[in-house]
Amino acid sequence: MTPHLARRTADIQPFHVMELLRRARELEAQGRDIIHMEVGEPDFPTPQPMIDAATRFLTSGDVHYTAALGLPQLREAIARFYHDRFGADVAPERIIVTPGASGALMLALAATTDPGDEWLLPDPGYPSNRHIVRSFEGVARALPVNADTRFQPTPAQVGGAWTPRTRGLIVATPSNPTGTLLDAAELAALRAAVLARGGTLIVDEIYQGLTYGVDSSTVLRSMDDVFVVNSFSKYFGMTGWRLGWLVAPSAYVREIEKLAQHFFISPSTPAQHAALAAFAPSTIDILEARRNEFATRRDTLLPALRQQGFIVAAEPQGAFYIYADISQLAADSEQFAQRLIEEVGVAATPGLDFGDNQPRRHLRIAYTNRQERLLEAVERLARLRA
């Protein structure tokens, strides 16, 4: 049988890091020791207070749908977190709990994108963003960014790329794959550039909380006319629970609710009850200790990689990635990544996943592993070069 596939599927590329992970698992099944630095997933377990909260809920057996927008008490807890942690006043009614941050971006794009609408996205950037745009019949247009602007777009670049078909701009702070930030003034300038052209700004804050040497913040401290995507996966360590949220301008919430009803029915009920414990002081203490550990890992790995010939021109201040230029070591990051995993058992992600802006000379390295394993990975890199 010849399948009849929608035309959009031809434009959806595989997520190469997941295929690299599959190869790593194959090698591990053969008895090989693989150091994982490829997947953007914290290596810490879900904090125990969240597990306890989910267990208590599941023991009751009362596991049913919630409202499509999420548990009211969880939306209120997220709003309190914005106020207490960041000094941002966000009405709970604007918060939509979603199946992961991907679900949040899907809802934002579904509510705002007509066929042929263009969205501007930094390149390099998180790959799923452009594919979700395509899935809603939009057009993802790349804004090539480099270390000169810390791999973040500028208002002048946005203005130069804007066309009558442009719908808006998607940015991330902290960003994946580079770990760089946009400060309040830069976000305000980008917002002004977008709004002056009648567009929409979507800000990805899923690594909020994971910053080093600089306080975490939110665009919502000063703006209520942007969409903000967030997640319980990264700072809160709940990747497998698949839970995130979207903060939308008030005028969009009812329409997004209708979309959420049909797309998802509701987010995972056990995951929502686990997340109710995410903001407890005992949980935050655990999460802050982990953030400090990530900072130590970054500070250990950065100089070690540079000593091996990796170029890191824009130092990461957030997330848990180092986006390294490998041009002094190899001509092609995909081939280099294959050699790394096959010859010395180190898994890292080639730039191919993150766009078309010099992907062959970049490698994303995640410090989501114990410090001793990171140092062992550097020793293996040295053997590969020898």
Image (spheres, rainbow, N blue to C red):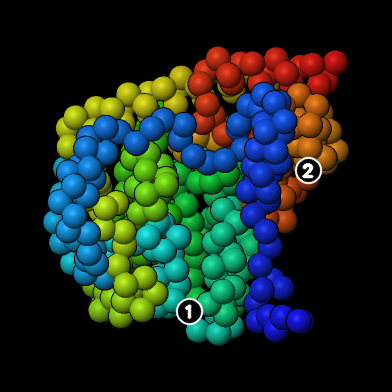
For this rendering, which residue is in front, 47 or 145? 47
Image mark for residue 170 = none
Amino acid at dot 2: Glu
In the displayed structure image, the side of residue 329 where residue 163 appears, left or right: left
State the quadrant of the C terminus.
top right
Amino acid at dot 1: Thr
Q: Residue at x 71, y 73 (%)?
A: 10
For this rendering, which residue is in front, 310 or 190? 310
Image mark for residue 334 = 2
> Residue 287 in the image: x percent, y percent?
31, 31
Q: Residue at x 45, y 44 (%)?
A: 174
Is residue 356 visible in this depiction of the protein? yes
Mark 1 lies on a secondary structure that is: loop
> Residue 268 in the image: x percent, y percent?
31, 59
Q: Residue at x 64, y 42 (%)?
A: 21
Q: Quadrant of residue 91?
A: bottom left
In the displayed structure image, the side of residue 168 where residue 304 appears, left or right: right
The vertical placement of 129 against 278, above or below, is: below
Q: Residue beneath label 1, please?
A: 113
How far apart are labels 2 and 1 at the CA level? 33 Å
